[in-house]
Image (cartoon, grey):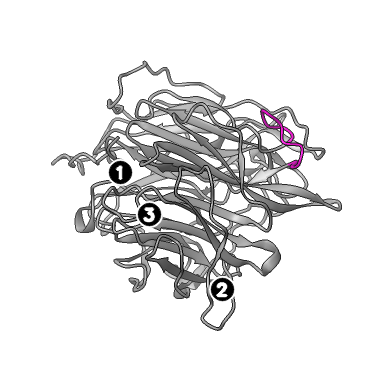
């Protein structure tokens, strides 16, 4: 199947659009959606619940049952696949299972379930692992296979410790094979991508980059050339001094010529004064360049009691230009709040200076965090469509957040007004708890199907008695722009 190409922007696409999402009172209501044919994007903005329900907890540790957090998505043809954690642990990291939600009709209707063979609580239970984390979604066009890599945990005394890189595969995004082991130990913060350009010399190669938890966060990459059935031995990333380069939050993308570009933070994990690093491979992952820094993060500490780690989000356009987005306070007086800032590179080596996305209100800047960035397939340069989904703090009686979406049709030079996804502010006390505070996750994601932007993300819809933090899918018509 050929990759989905974004449709041309309407001459009126920047006109204020009065059509808004029908109000969704945050009480679990669903938007009724008819079953359409493939290749028929929505014609009005549509928000609907994509995945919900609990998990039978067999992990041996308490979990927050009806919680779903930290969503990634990927799209190919008319299919969008998302993956997220289900049943977040109350005592530490990870969740009881990884969930999936899939649409095969441009984001109009959804199926959902749990991935098999990952943990004690998964379908086809895996007795070796109580918890799992760090899921991402990739598609291998050459082998017509969906892949969801994730990282399982083992018990370590009274705590848990990241362990193995596991991969679930599927031919249709709905029926998933039992997870297989790609790397047996020493894995954290894994992220996967595949080379889907038919003219690339490495077409059909899939890469998972990660940090090695027990090796001072030295970075490594494994490669599969058979749709995730088998994986190479880990290839270490050099530091140029005879050792291995250290880093965290690794995110690989593939340029059309087959060059893999990996963006990461240093071991300071995206905090204030962390460096953003980039390194590349031009030989199908056999060797990697020495990482070079291209930006230093300036970060305002988000309100106490909210987990908002700063993981970069990365995408690549049809010409190979790589864009990176992260939270940063450099453009606010006194670094008083975090904006979203964007940098780009034509080769993964030389980068632009960070530029602010103008998404703050006219006065009273507030923290923006957990962004997900996408570039519409087939668009590039000064006419590239970039879309972003993110969370932001908003006023309420306690502490609240909104989920928002914005888009640019000129390569990021100008941006639409932000569109609020949820109909009422979400109190952070409704969110899953963690040792670092309440959380929706460390990242978000946007994907495009036939020109339609689709995001799947957690929204809390009721006070946690019990929790009701479930997955919601927002599908937007091609060429749609939020009004003022």
Residue situated furthest right in the rendering = 157
Closest to the camera, between mark 2 and mark 3, is 2
Image coords of residue 74 (percent x, y) = 42, 41
Q: Is residue 372 above or below residue 145?
A: below
Q: Which residue is mark 2?
A: 245
**Span colored in magenta:** 120-130
Q: Which residue is mark 1?
A: 484
Q: Is residue 394 left or right of residue 253?
A: right
**Which sits earlier in the primary sequence, circle 2 or circle 1?**
2
Neighbor class of circle 3 (other Cα within 10 Å; few <14, some 14-19, many 20+) is many
Q: Is residue 173 above or below residue 446?
A: above
Frontmost residue, 10 versus 367: 10
Residue situated furthest bottom in the rendering = 241
**Residue 286 colored magenta?**
no
Is disc 1 placed on a helix, strand or loop? loop
Q: Which residue is mark 3?
A: 315
Q: Main secondary structure of the magenta part?
A: loop
**Which sits earlier in the primary sequence, circle 1 or circle 3?**
3
Image coords of residue 125 (percent x, y) = 71, 31
Q: Is residue 363 left or right of residue 234?
A: left
Alpha carbon of mark 2 to alpha carbon of mark 3: how far?
23 Å
Image coords of residue 445 (percent x, y) = 45, 45
């Amino acid at each position: 199947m050929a990759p989905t190409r974004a449709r041309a922007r309407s001459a009126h696409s920047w006109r204020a659009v009065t059509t808004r999402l029908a109000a969704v009172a945050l009480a679990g209501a669903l938007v009724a959606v008819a079953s359409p044919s493939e290749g028929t994007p929505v014609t009005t903005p549509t928000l609907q619940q994509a995945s919900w329900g609990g998990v039978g907890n067999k992990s041996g540790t308490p979990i927050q049952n009806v919680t779903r957090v930290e969503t990634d998505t990927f799209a190919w043809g008319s299919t969008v696949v998302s993956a997220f954690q289900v049943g977040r642990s109350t005592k530490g990291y990870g969740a009881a299972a990884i969930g999936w939600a899939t649409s095969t009709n441009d984001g109009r209707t959804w199926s959902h379930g749990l991935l098999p063979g990952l943990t004690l609580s998964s379908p086809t239970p895996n007795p070796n692992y109580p918890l799992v984390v760090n899921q991402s979604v990739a598609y291998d066009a050459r082998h017509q296979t969906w892949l969801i890599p994730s990282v399982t945990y083992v018990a370590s005394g009274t705590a848990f410790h990241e362990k193995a890189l596991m991969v679930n595969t599927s031919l249709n995004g709905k029926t998933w094979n039992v997870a297989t082991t790609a790397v047996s130990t020493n894995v954290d913060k894994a992220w996967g991508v595949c080379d889907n350009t038919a003219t690339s010399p490495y077409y059909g190669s899939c890469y998972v980059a990660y940090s090695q938890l027990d090796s001072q966060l030295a970075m490594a990459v494994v490669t599969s050339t058979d749709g995730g059935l088998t994986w190479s031995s880990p290839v270490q990333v050099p530091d140029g001094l005879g050792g291995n380069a250290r880093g965290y939050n690794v995110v690989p993308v593939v340029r059309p010529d087959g060059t893999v570009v990996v963006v990461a933070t240093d071991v300071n994990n995206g905090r204030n004064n962390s460096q953003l690093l980039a390194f590349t491979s031009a030989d199908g992952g056999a060797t990697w360049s020495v990482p070079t820094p291209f930006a230093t993060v300036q970060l305002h500490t988000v309100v106490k009691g909210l987990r908002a780690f700063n993981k970069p989000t990365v995408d690549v356009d049809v010409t190979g230009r790589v864009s990176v987005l992260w939270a940063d306070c450099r453009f606010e007086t006194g670094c008083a709040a975090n904006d979203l800032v964007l940098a780009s590179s034509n080769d993964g080596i030389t980068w632009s200076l960070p530029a602010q996305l103008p998404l703050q209100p006219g006065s009273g800047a507030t923290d923006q965090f957990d962004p997900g960035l996408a570039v519409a397939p087939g668009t590039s340069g000064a006419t590239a469509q970039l879309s972003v989904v993110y969370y932001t703090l908003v006023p309420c009686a306690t502490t609240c957040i909104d989920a928002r979406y914005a888009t640019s049709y000129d390569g990021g030079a100008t941006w639409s007004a932000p569109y609020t996804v949820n109909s009422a502010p979400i109190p952070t006390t409704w969110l899953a708890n963690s040792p670092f505070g309440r959380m929706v996750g460390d990242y978000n994601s946007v994907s495009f199907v036939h020109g339609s932007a689709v995001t799947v993300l957690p929204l809390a819809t009721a006070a946690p008695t019990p929790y009701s933090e479930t997955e919601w899918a927002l599908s937007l018509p091609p060429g749609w722009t939020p009004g003022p």
